[in-house]
Each structure stands twice: as C-alpha cells, then as structure tokens.
Amino acid sequence: MSETAKIILGEKEYELPVITGSGGEKAIDITKLRDLTGHITMDIGYKNTGVTTSAITFLDGELGILRHRGYAIEDLTEKASFLEVAYLLLHGDLPNKAQFHEFDEDVREHTLVNEGLEGMFKAFPTGSHPMGQLSSMITALSLFYPKSLNPNRPEDAVNRTVLRLLAKMPTICAMIYKKRNGHPIIYPKNNLDYVTNYLNMTFGQVSMDHYHPDPVVVDAMNKLLILHADHEQNCSTSTIRMVGSSQANLYSSIGAGINALWGQLHGGANQQVLEMLEVIRQDGGDVKKWIIKAKDKNDNFRLMGFGHRVYKNFDPRAKIIKKTCDDVLNKLGVYDPVLEIAKKLEEAALTDPYFVERKLYPNVDFYSGIIYRAMGFPTDFFTVLFALGRLPGWISQWQEMRKQKQPIARPRQIYIGEKPRKFKFMQDRD
Ligand code: SDX
C-alpha cells in the first residue's frame, strides 16, 4: 500500500501520493495539486520544495552525510582522484582501469582551447573579477562549437561537448590567472595528470624548464576539487537544471551556473570568508566582538562560511578541509595568522546559543580559502576553484535532467498587485 498525504480544503479532502527516496527521505507529490484543488503551494527560496528525483548525490543535513552515487565523501577524498570522481558522477560508477584510461585519454585530447578565445582577454578590464571572465569564456565556447548549440544531438556528440568542457575548464582557469598577472599563458602538457596539468598551467613559467608542484599541493587540490564536485540541488546546480530545461546548450547552461555560484551567499562565500578574516585580523583579532556583530539583527555582518540550508550539523566537507588546511600549512611551512582567527571564531560560535539554536556550523567555504591562499591563489580567484571542482557535478545534473526528459521549468506565483484598472490618457492623469 503506497503512502499518501491527505489535504483538507473547506469541505473537500484530497489524497496525494508520497514519494520515498532510497535514503528514506519523504516528499508529497503535488504534481496534480492545481488540477485537483485549484491551489498551488508557496515556498519562498524552495526551502521545502523538491524539484526532481536524482541518483547522483545524497545529503543528510541532520547527520552531516554526503555521498556521491553511494560512495561516502570521506572515502572519495582519501582514495580517489578528482578525475575518477568526475567519471563516477557522469557515468554512475567508479571506472575500472580500462574505462579510466579511455576517459583520461579523451579528456587529454581536448585540453587546448581555440586561440581566438585568448582575444577575449583584450576586452576584459585589467583586474576584472575572474568569475565574470570565466562565465564569459565558458559561454563563448558555444560560439566556437556551433554544432553544440543543439543539445538534442546524438549522445556521442553531446559526450564530446562534455569532454571538451571538462578538458578546457582548467586551461581557461589557468589562462585567466596568467592574464591577470600579465604573464604569458602556459599550454597544457598532456603527459601530466589532470590536477598537475592545471597547477602547471597556473604556476609554471615559460622561463622554467620544469615546474614540479609540491605533491602536498597536488594532493590538497585533488581533495578540494573532489569536495566541491557536486552537492545535489544547490543554487547554481538548480540554475543549470532550469536553464538546461529550456533546451539551452550545455556551455550556456554551465555559464549560467558559474554566475549563480559567484553570489556571496553561495560559492562567493569562500572569498568573503578570507576578506572577513582579514578585517577581523586588522581590527585586532577580537573574535568575541565579531560574534556579537554576527548575532546583532541591526548589523548586516554575517559570519561568512557559517550556516547552510541543508546541513544542520557539521558540513562533512568542512571537517575534511580543516584537517587538510592544517596538513598543507604545516607541510608548506606556511604560518597564516587568519587560520588561528578562523579556529577561534569556530570555537566561539560552536558554543554560542545563537549559533547552536540555529544549527549554524562551518560550511565548505570556511577553511577552503586559507588553503587556496597558502597555495598562492589571490582571494578573488577562490570561487573559480569552486567552479572548477563543481563542473562534473553540474554536467552530471544537467545530463540527468535531460535523460529524465523533464519539462521546461516554469514556477507559478500568487499575484498581489493592482486589481483591473481603466486606462487614462496622460492629459487625464492627476
Ligand atoms: C555554499 O546549497 C548548497 O549546497 C551550497 C553549497 C554547495 O556546495 O553548493 O554547500 C555551497 O553555498 C555554502 C554556503 C556559503 N554561504 C555562506 O557561508 C554565507 C553565510 N551563510 C548564510 O548566509 C546562510 O547560512 C546560508 C545562505 C548559507 C543559508 O541561509 P538560509 O538557509 O536561507 O538560512 P537563513 O538565512 O534563513 O538563516 C536562518 C537564521 C537567520 O536568523 P533568524 O532570522 O532565524 O534569527 O540563521 C541566521 C539568519 O540570520 N544565520 C546567520 C548566518 N547564517 C544564517 N547568522 C549569522 N551568520 C551566518 N552566517
């Protein structure tokens, strides 16, 4: 007997089906609600609204659990490479040796970008934000591959677009970094693995014979990219699914997701965290004073990197990043005073009733920026690294939405404006 929910409206009672997920989550299926009752639901910010079923990522916000295709994030960060996790998200299981070799080779084949793309840098104002550059360049890829504009092409053609995106994203991210420093770009080297190649294109120099990134940095970057790889229906992923539902091409859907991620309440938070920690440091490091400000409703200061729509327990990613942060800074021999401030803030917040009652814990963005800074990235580049990690998740969610043949996303509203009015010509208006 399948579970149902009863709704009573006036004298009438309606029964709606209940959907149960493989993790035990429950949803009342309101697909037929308007036809049955003439009512829609209201849920500002979709805090209680499921927009799809999905087999990619499972989150349990109360228990702080994150799994991709059934594999725990703790296992994936410890035992897999980022490219393996990208394969897992896209294909549904971890690759065997032959599958990984083919995938790795396919990606290597597409790492170069059309030289015409480099011309775009002439239009970007010097020092302009890397996220604006990234979304422009990723959307511009669709102009270089006109056949990709039709997402309804055969699967192998769409897969080529997927491979091009995965392969060219690191190259474009590195180009943005180089151009902002006024340095010549470093081309991809296809004898390097995905992450080492990215670090070489970023930190290598034409004047160097060889650039050997510190294995500590390569390992930490692998972990960080895996930790950002997917996170079910977050703001940017939902944006991509919505844009993709109009049958926009994959490049423009990903460009839209990059723009959504840029927001400071979402992926832009990692940049805000570092800027916040710097302000607190320069203000003398009085953590208590800033905790009070974060709680003061008349003060628009928020503790950036804290709180989460889903996690009402520790964000499992924050725990892993905090440990990685300690490891990387110790092994690189970097002392960053803001790390101590971050730890004191965390300690103070986790015992403060305001944060405890609202279940506000450090999220993925709280410590990540400290590692990125230790690696040598400028603060306004951190969200680009978030996007680089999130790309395989975004693509897998876009592919899933298309495979599910979902209709164009078009939410409803409740109108609260003027009632019908008679038009008056300008000379008759008061
Ligand atoms: C990411 O969705 C995802 O999965 C996102 C992400 C992913 O991987 O894709 O995990 C990545 O975006 C992480 C979040 C990064 N953003 C920040 O760190 C910005 C700071 N955090 C907040 O702005 C906030 O916590 C959000 C945006 C993350 C969540 O906001 P919600 O769920 O809409 O919660 P809310 O704003 O309604 O807050 C509930 C209460 C409010 O107080 P009351 O009105 O109940 O008195 O908690 C307070 C808020 O004022 N609150 C905070 C706070 N976050 C929430 N108070 C102080 N500092 C904070 N950081």
Image (cartoon, rainbow, N blue to C red):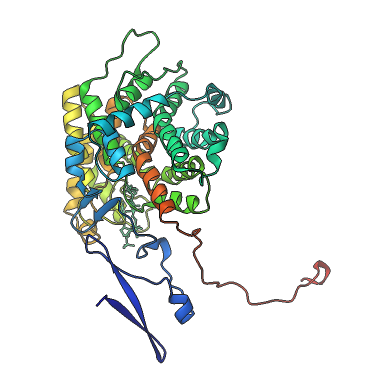
Picture quarter with ligand 1: bottom left
* For residue 94, above or below residue 20: above
- Name which residue lies at 28% across and 34% down: 99
Q: Quadrant of the N terminus?
A: bottom left
In this view, the residue in front, 414 or 27, is 27
State which quadrant residue 417 falls in.
bottom right
In this view, the residue in front, 426 or 249, is 249
In this view, the residue in front, 341 or 286, is 341
Q: Quadrant of the C terminus?
A: bottom right
Q: Position of residue 323 (x, y in %)?
A: 16, 37
Q: Position of residue 12 (x, y in %)?
A: 40, 89
State which quadrant residue 368 falls in.
top left
Task: Locate residue 197 relative to residue 425 in the image: left or right.
Answer: left
Q: Position of residue 51 (x, y in %)?
A: 39, 61
Q: Is residue 259 among the parts visible in the rendering?
A: yes
State which quadrant residue 190 falls in.
top left
* For residue 84, above or below residue 12: above
